Image (cartoon, rainbow, N blue to C red):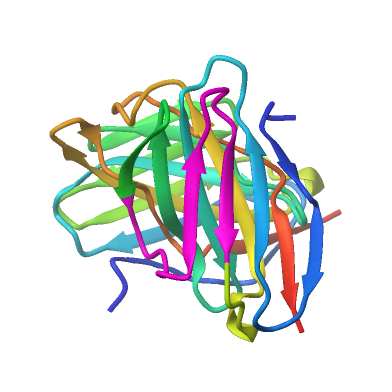
Amino acid sequence: QKEVEQDPGPLSVPEGAIVSLNCTYSNSAFQYFMWYRQYSRKGPELLMYTYSSGNKEDGRFTAQVDKSSKYISLFIRDSQPSDSATYLCAMSARSDTGRRALTFGSGTRLQVQP
Amino acid sequence: DSGVTQTPKHLITATGQRVTLRCSPRSGDLSVYWYQQSLDQGLQFLIHYYNGEERAKGNILERFSAQQFPDLHSELNLSSLELGDSALYFCASSELQGALTDTQYFGPGTRLTVL
């Protein structure tokens, strides 16, 4: 079993829809959670990060973490065709020097139809 | 543009060969991370260097090695290449040595094809 599980999709939604992307994890030591967006033939770019359970909002994006269920989500409101990309969740645990290496989900491919 | 540069963009080579991938981190960043992204394995952490010193190793094969030079650029060396090494190789950089608030910025990647 992988430490981080993510549905690969593809997920196809109409423009303006609310998108929900999710990851589950098995390692209870994970404390630091991120979402990256990766456009085709590009490197991943950081969208949001959070340390704690609860919600964090940034514009149209909301990251949600439920440590008790080992479940994280990314919500995209008013989705746009430019949001079409692969979304990767990533997480890491604390180490003596700060933070251990990132463990990524396999990514969910999102297609927003105009 | 993240500020991280990688060369070459594409590399096509044969099995058994050796290649070197190069990464220049963002100005001021001391940490360099290497990742491999393949269709079946997703994005896998390979190795982390901070200011010239190896800090952490992930799923890096013994045929692969890396180093970070005094000017902070890094090279990933892949030898005795196999078909299964075909993948995208990403470099990322960050300011610190992996603190909780340390954001990694990814380069555009090198696409390696082993024939």
- The location of residue B114, given as percent across then percent down, is 72, 78
* Left or right of residue A24, residue A67 in this image: left
Which quadrant of the structure image shows residue B11?
A: bottom right
Q: Residue furthest top?
A: B28
Q: Is residue A113 magenta?
A: no
- The location of residue A74, given as percent across then percent down, is 47, 47
Q: Quadrant of the C terminus of chain B?
A: bottom right
Residue at the location (40% across, 69% down)? B62
Q: Quadrant of the N terminus of chain B?
A: top right
Where is B2 relative to B47, above or below? above
Depth check: give the residue in front, A51 or A54.
Answer: A51
* Left or right of residue A9, residue A32 in this image: left
Read off the magenta span. B57-78
Residue at the location (41% across, 50% down)? B47
Residue at the location (48% across, 43% down)? B67
* Number of dots carrying numbers: 0
Residue at the location (77% across, 55% down)? A41
Q: Residue furthest right?
A: A114
